[in-house]
Amino acid sequence: MKHKYSERRGSSVISFRLLVVTITCLLSSKNLSSFASASDASVISSPSSPREFSILSSPTPPFITGRVFTNGIVQDVPHDKVILDAGLGEMALADVIGCCSTSLSSSSDGCSSSSENDAEAMKRVIIGKMPQFTSQQSLVTLQSAISAWDGGSGTWPQMTLNERIKAVQTFIQHLQSKRSEIVTALMYEIGKNQVDAESEFDRTMKFTKQVIEYIQSNTHSEFGSDWDASHGSTRLFMKRAAIGIVLCLGPYNYPLNETYATLIPALLMGNVILLKIPTVGGLSHLLTMEAFHKSFPPGTINFISGSGRVTMPPLMKSGRVDALAFIGASSAADRLIKDHPNPHRLKVFLQLEAKNMGVYLSNLFDNSKSAGEQQVEWETILKETVAGTLSYNGQRCTALKLLFVPKDKSEGFASMLAERVENLHVGLPWETKENPKDGTFTYPQVTPLPNRGRVEYMQALIQDAVSKGARVMNKNGGMIIGDQDESTLMVPAVLYPVTPNCRLYSEEQFGPIIPIAPYDSLAEVMTYAKDGKYGQQVSIFTSTSNHNNHAKESKVVADLIDRFSTVFGKININSQCGRSPDAAPFSGRRSSAMGTMSVSHALQEFSIPTLVSYKDVGMTKTVIEGVEVHSNFLTKV
């Protein structure tokens, strides 16, 4: 049925006491799989005591019906082979498997080592259906975008900027009513804890408002202001105008926020959008379709879901895509660009991989500092390191992915970091842990990965490093909690020493692994930076305490900043890497980015500065004054 949603809810919510018992057993039983050699067994022992967890409210697993949105029409796809309107025809569906569930075996009897029911913990469930577009159906959707664009004469691109702003504001108002459902979908599909899922939604809303406020600030001539009379008799009116049809592909780790960071600015500038829903993390997008339907002219935005290898090549080969907004892997971006028959005409915006370094300087380990100074300094540094490496399980392009530490201090650093990691709250996205001191609750810092493919990749990287001499430094590092064939809840692994022959030295892990690489001199670090494939960000950690070598150490940091300034897009001092604040430019070099993301830069990425000019002689000014009354383009914000 068009314009309607039907949502089926799961049935039972388990007793969390049973979950605690089961996870506790799993942490100390044969259900933990180790990557360490026999000699490392003492390093990866079970926790000395189980951690206490509680649940404030355990959400019921969602079931999100498959649906499509093309040419302004929302259509549910409740089962396979439904015949759809808008020329789409028969649509296939695929199950969407959640990363985790609240269900456990009802017959599990707790800690019996012989019970096979323990393995039922963390089994995954179907939480929705995703339409699987064919190549032909993606081309049908493209036709909707072509009609809506109409060579730049379509309804949306011809609206005034003020009208487009009002439409986006209406969309945001409608989307707010879906906040709870979207947050739940993010938790169950990609394992984002409740606080982070809520933050993703709220940050997206805030970003949208900031973009609009930037346009409306009236200090930016690029969005239409008074005529520029600073060039003699020539008068200039400059305003940014749309590029055309923009193909947006967002990532799974921030399916809403990262996608909208390109989508919203592109819409505001008058572009028509083809949105490719990510294969993982896509259910949240299905929940937005009705809000788009209520807010924009038909065809302004169209959704495509299913296999990217099936649906994307026909779109690019058609030559009708004018701009590509892609956040993901560089190899996929290269394939898409090569498919375009006129790549010189394709406006490209890319945010890709990174292998961000954390560089720890030797002055941090200066023994001349007092114990109090060292404690305060290391508290800050370890806090930033843990957050930088493991926020959202390390599944961020901005995560710290390789830590360089002075060789003679590296093992002690690894042990210190491992102890911090061991104290992290590992659990399901909605679990809470109570602080007995003040009664406050916190959500888990480590949650399930989105699918088994990610788990298997982590296992392969750990196995490779261990086979080449690295050790897992933290208890239970790399362990899988629950069913070994289904569970995706992995305890983070601190690996030391990681050397250049390890895959982790160069590959982006994008997961809960912290590789520590010892260095003899900063020349090794600089060589890694200069010769590396990526160039997004770096974090430099240096002592803030007063000591005898302050001037010398300041020069070391200054030299690193100067040399890193031509390698990375952002250099962080004593803090983790990150994208925020959204008003600041988020850029990168090499295979990490093409284009700059921010509140202001994204508007520029998806528009063209367009001029209207005349000579202020004779009656031309009078003509222009009459034209301004009727022109949408010449309307000021």
Image: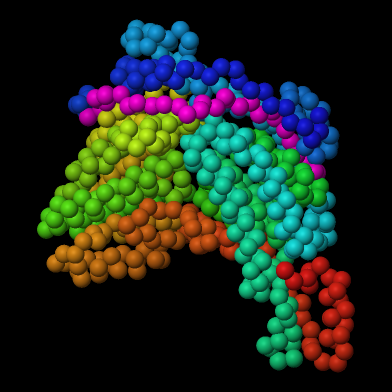
Front-most of residues 206 and 624:
206
Seen at 75% across and 63% down, the residue is: 162
Q: Quadrant of residue 564?
A: bottom left
Q: Position of residue 518 (x, y in %)?
A: 23, 48
Query: Magenta residues: mostly which secondary structure?
Result: loop
> Per the image, is 362 magenta?
no
Seen at 29% across and 47% down, the residue is: 382
Q: Position of residue 203 (x, y in %)?
A: 55, 50
> Could you tell me which quadrant the C terminus lies in?
bottom right
Horizontal side, residue 53 vs residue 38: left or right: right
Tell me the magenta residue range. 43-72
Q: Does residue 487 show up?
A: yes
Picture layout, residue 514 above or below residue 351: above
Q: Position of residue 316 (x, y in %)?
A: 69, 48
> Could you tell me which quadrant the N terminus lies in?
top right
Q: Position of residue 358 (x, y in %)?
A: 33, 52
Front-most of residues 621 and 93:
621
Picture layout, residue 265 above or below residue 276: below
Seen at 71% across and 92% down, the residue is: 232
Q: Quadrant of residue 477?
A: top left
Q: Does residue 531 show up?
A: no
